[in-house]
Image (spheres, rainbow, N blue to C red):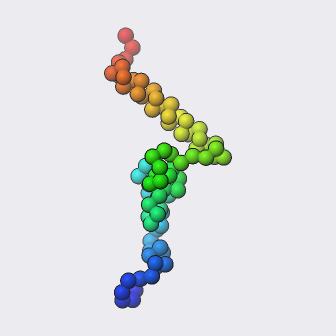
Amino acid sequence: MSKGTAAKGLKRNKGRLHIRCRRCGKAAYHKIKSVCSSCGYGNSAKLRRYNWCKKTVSKIRIIAKIKQHMNKRKKSGFKLGK
Ligand SMILES: [Zn+2]
């Protein structure tokens, strides 16, 4: 590279633009935008979802159901049967 600060274009081409997302684990986290293109981490607290993507919608529903169940168990103090 030459002397001085490189142009912005060179900044983008260095290495990978998308790195592993710490929320969903996919390599979809944009380094410069600091937003995950898969789950929307960095953009919103809620998971990124669209009704045209049925797979994601169903997956998120399952996760929500598991969380609900775990909260119920937490309230009762994780008791097992009688
Ligand atoms: Zn993500």
**In the rendered image, the vertical position of residue 9 relative to residue 34, given as above or below:** below
Residue at left offset 44%, top offset 54%: 42
Query: x and y percent of residue 63 in the render?
Result: 50, 36
Screen quadrant of the N terminus: bottom left
Q: Which residue is most to the left? A: 77
Query: x and y percent of residue 55 in the render?
Result: 61, 43
Screen quadrant of the C terminus: top left
Query: x and y percent of residue 58 in the render?
Result: 59, 38
Q: Which residue is most to the right? A: 52
Residue 73 quadrant = top left
Query: x and y percent of residue 5 in the render?
Result: 38, 83
Q: Which residue is most to the bottom? A: 3
Residue at left offset 53%, top offset 34%: 62
Residue 56 quadrant = top right
- Residue 19 visible to an observer of this rendering: no
Total labels drawn: 0
> Is 49 positioned to the left or the right of 77 in the image?
right
Observer-nearest of 31 and 79: 31
**In the rendered image, the vertical position of residue 11 relative to residue 46, given as above or below:** below
